[in-house]
Image (tube, coloured by chain):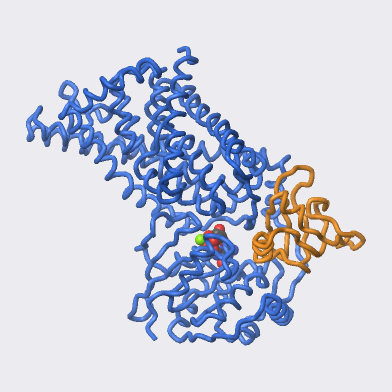
Amino acid sequence: MKINKILLMGNPNVGKSAIFSRLTGAKVVISNYPGTTVEFTQGYTKIDSSRPAIIDVPGTYTLHPTSRAEEVAVRMIKDGDLVINIVDATNLERNLYLTLELLEQDIPVIVALNMWDDTKHKGIEIDVKKLEKALGIPVIPTCGLTGEGIKELVEHIPKAKAKKINPLKDEERWKHIGKIIEDVQKLHHRHHTFLERLEDLSIRPVTGIPIAALVVLCAFWVIRFVAENLITYLADPFFERIWTPLIMKLSAFLGAGGFLHDIIIGKLIEGELDYSQTFGLFTTGLYVPFAMVLPYIISFYFVLGVMEDFGYLPRLAVLTDNFMHRLGLHGYAIIPMILGLGCNVPGVLAIRILEEKREKFIAATLMAIAIPCMAQIAMIVGLVGQRGGAYVVLIFLTLFILLIIKGIILNKVMKGKSPEILVEMPPYRIPQLLAVFKKLWMRILSFLKEAVPYVLLGILFVNILYVLHVIDALSKIFSPLLRNVWGLPKEAIAALIVGFLRKDVAIGMLGPLNLTTKQLVIGSTVLAIYFPCIATFAVLIRELGIKDMLKSAAIMISVGIVVGGLLNLVLRF
Amino acid sequence: MLISLVDMEPGETGIVMKIDGGFGATRRIQSMGVRIGKRVKKVGARFWRGPQTVLVDNFKVAIGFGMAAKIFVEVERSEDK
Ligand SMILES: Nc1nc2c(ncn2[C@@H]2O[C@H](COP(=O)(O)OP(=O)(O)O)[C@@H](O)[C@H]2O)c(=O)[nH]1
Ligand SMILES: [Mg+2]
C-alpha cells in the first residue's frame, strides 16, 4: 500500500511537535494558525522516493473524544494511512491506553517511545523488546530533542502493517495494560531535580504569585528590549538608507501631486518622506507592518514560544483560576487571552479549547474588547509612547479594568456558571531551540499573510474614500459624537473607519492629526474597544454564530462610546 | 478513611476510591489517568479554593476545586512513603 498521509498521534505534551519538526523539512503548511490545540500542522517528509504528508494531530488521551480537540483528532484517523503513536516513556501506563485503542483501528501503527532520554534520570527501566512483543508492533525509542531514533522510525514506515486487535472494554483494557506494565517496566528510586521542585513552587499561591509576577515582568521587558533593538538597528536603518532613496526616485518619476503618486507614495511633507504621515501604499503601507509591528510580533512570539515549551502556561492557568472564575471563565481561558495578545485571530480560534457556549461567548467578547493585539500594542507604544510611558500604561490599565468589570457583569447576567478547570501540568523542560524557532517562523509567516494585505487594503481604501470625499461627508455626520462625547476632531473618523480593517493603521492615522495627548489616549483606547478588526470579526462569526456575534458587537460599540466618553470627562491633562 | 482530594494534605498519598462527578466529567478525568484504584499524591497548596494538583505515576493533573471535592481517596497516613 502506498503511504500518503502519516498521522502523529499521542497524549498532549509527549513530544509530537518536536518529532514533527524533526521529520519535516522547512516547508510546512499550517491550517490556519499554529499553537492552538485544535489547529493542526502539516508538513512533508521524504521516505525513499515518496514524499508523504505528515500531520501533527492535536493531543488526545482517548479515541472516545471527551473534548473538541479530541474530536478533531479522532476524525483525522479516517483519512490517514499510518499512525506514528508517540508515547511518553515516562508515563507508559496512561499512554498505552491510546495505543491499544489505536490497535483496534484498521490502520498500521508504529510506536515512538519518546522522552527516552528522560527515563534514565526518572529511574524508569523499560524492556523495549518485550513491549514490542506484547503489542505486536514496532516500538522505537526516540528523543525528540536530539533526533535520536528518528532514522529508525522512518525505516519502519514502509513495512508497517495494520494489526487490528479485537476491541476491549474499558476495564479489560486497563487490566491488559497493567499486565504489560508489570512485565516490561521497572522503577528505581531517585531524587527530585531542581526543575521538579520549581514546578511545585510555581503552583502554590505564596510562592507562585511572586514567580508569576516575575515571569510576566521579565517577559514584557524582553519583548520590548528585543523589539526596540530590532527597530533601531534593523528596521529603521533599512527604511532610511535603502528604501527612502528608492521611493524618492520613484516619486520624482511619478511626478508629485498625481493620483497615482498619492496612492503609491502618498503626500510628501515639504518634499520630505515621513513614514508616519505620508500614507501611501509603498511608504506607510510597508513601514507600519514591517518596521513598527513585525519587530514586536517577532519578539512576542519568541517569548511566548519559550514559555509554551518550558511548560509555564498551564501553571499560570492554575494560579489565575480563582480570579478567572469571577469573570465567568476558568484558568485555562488565560491561554487564549495570551495568544490574543499576539493576534486576536488565533486567540479566538484557541477559544475552542473551552467547552461551553457561555464561556466561549464571554472569552470572545472580553478578548475583542479588552485584549489589544501586538500590532495595536506596538503602534500605541510607538505613537503614544512619544508623549510619555505613563500614557501607554494608562491605556492598558483602562483596558484591563474594563476586562474585569465586563467579565464580572457578563458572569452575573448570563445564565449558568463557569465550568471547572481540568488540565495536565507538563513537567518543566528546557525548550528546544529548533522547535522554538520553527514555531516562531510559522507564526511570523501567518502574521505577514494575514496582516500585510489588510494593511495595504486599508491604506488604499482610505485614500480612495478621501478622493471621493466620503470621509468629508462622514466626518460631518459623526462630528457630534466625536467632538461632544470623545472630544476628538472630526477628522478622526477616518481612523475609526480604517479600524474596521486594521487597528495598527488606524492608530497610525491618529499621528498626523496633531492631537493633544488626551485626545491621543482617548482615540487609541476607543480604537481598541469599539470593534474588532475584520479578520477577527470573521473568525468571531464563525466561532460564535451570527446571532451571538451581533450581541457581542452591540456590547463592544456601546462600551466603546461609554468608555471614550468617561475618559473625556475624567482625564485632566 | 475516605476523604476528598480537597481535604488531603500536601504531600499525602492515597488511593482513588470514588469519583462522584457527572458522566462526562468522570470520563474525562479517568481518561487523563486519574482512575479508581490509582495512587495519587497531592502537590501544591491546600488552603485556597483554587485547583488541586495531584501527581499520578509521573504526571500531574490540576483539577478544579469543585470537581476535586467530588473525588474521594483512601489516604495512606501510617505508611511512610
Ligand atoms: N527530554 C525530552 N524532552 C522532549 C522530548 N521530545 C520533546 N520534548 C520536549 O517536551 C515538550 C513538549 O513537546 P511537544 O513537542 O510540544 O509536545 P506535543 O504537545 O506532544 O506536541 C517540549 O518542551 C519539548 O522540547 C524528548 O525526547 N526528550
Ligand atoms: Mg504539539
Viewer-proximal residue, A118 or A474?
A: A474
- Left or right of A189 in this view: A464: left
- Left or right of A264 in this view: A307: right
- Left or right of B52 in this view: A226: left
Q: Colour of chain B?
A: orange
Residue A22 screen position, x and y as percent: 45, 67
Viewer-proximal residue, A117 or A160?
A: A160
Residue A498 screen position, x and y as percent: 30, 33
User: Where, by quadrant of the figure, is residue A425 drawn?
Assistant: bottom right
Residue shown at 69% from the left, 62% from the top: B26
Q: How many marks?
A: 0
- Quarter holding the N terminus of chain A is bottom left
Q: Is residue A274 visible?
A: yes
Residue A199 screen position, x and y as percent: 68, 51
Q: Is residue A225 visible?
A: no
Instruction: Spot the residue most to the right.
Output: B78
- Quarter holding the C terminus of chain A is top left
- Left or right of A319 in this view: A460: left
Residue shown at 61% from the left, 69% from the top: A88
- A350 up-or-down from A257: above or below: below
Instruction: Spot the residue most to the top.
Output: A572
Residue B9 screen position, x and y as percent: 83, 51
- A346 up-or-down from A471: above or below: below
* Ligand 1 placement by image quarter: bottom right
Q: Colour of chain A?
A: blue
Residue shown at 12% from the left, 33% from the top: A261
